[in-house]
Image (tube, rainbow, N blue to C red):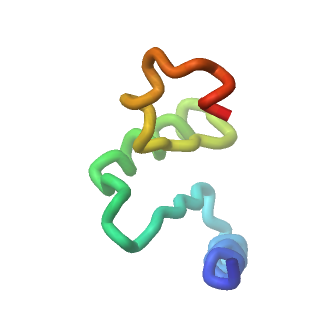
Amino acid sequence: GAALGTGFRAAQNHDADIVLTLDADGQHDVEKIPLFILAIQNGADVVIGSRMLDHLKGMPFHRKL
């Protein structure tokens, strides 16, 4: 929590247009970052990635919640 808050404040202080967060344990694919940036540049207000998307096919809606 505190590290995210510090990062968000730093982004605000530097007038950042885009803020992206990811875990430092290597479970996020950094090669996908350009896709997130492109989505924002194309008008998205928020972009949320999930490593579970491939596992959601066929899953009942209530399990996705």
20 sits to left or right of 63 = left
The quarter in which the N terminus is drawn is: bottom right
53 sits to left or right of 3 = left
Residue 26 in percent (x, y) is at: 31, 66
56 sits to left or right of 10 = left
Kindly indicate the quadrant of the structure image that contains residue 62.
top right
Q: Residue at x 62, y 57 (%)?
A: 17
Work out whether 29 lies above or below 16: above
The quarter in which the C terminus is drawn is: top right
Work out whether 64 lies above or below 49: above
Q: Residue at x 62, y 65 (%)?
A: 16
Work out whether 27 lies above or below 13: above
2 sits to left or right of 28 = right
**Which residue is at the far top?**
58
Camera-nearest residue between 5 and 39: 5
Camera-nearest residue between 15 and 21: 21
Q: Residue at x 55, y 31 (%)?
A: 42
Camera-nearest residue between 23 and 65: 65
Residue 33 in percent (x, y) is at: 38, 50
Total residue callouts = 0
**Which residue is at the far left?**
31
Camera-nearest residue between 57 and 50: 57
Kindly indicate the quadrant of the structure image that contains residue 23.
bottom left
Work out whether 10 lies above or below 60: below
Residue 20 in percent (x, y) is at: 53, 59
Residue 27 in percent (x, y) is at: 34, 60
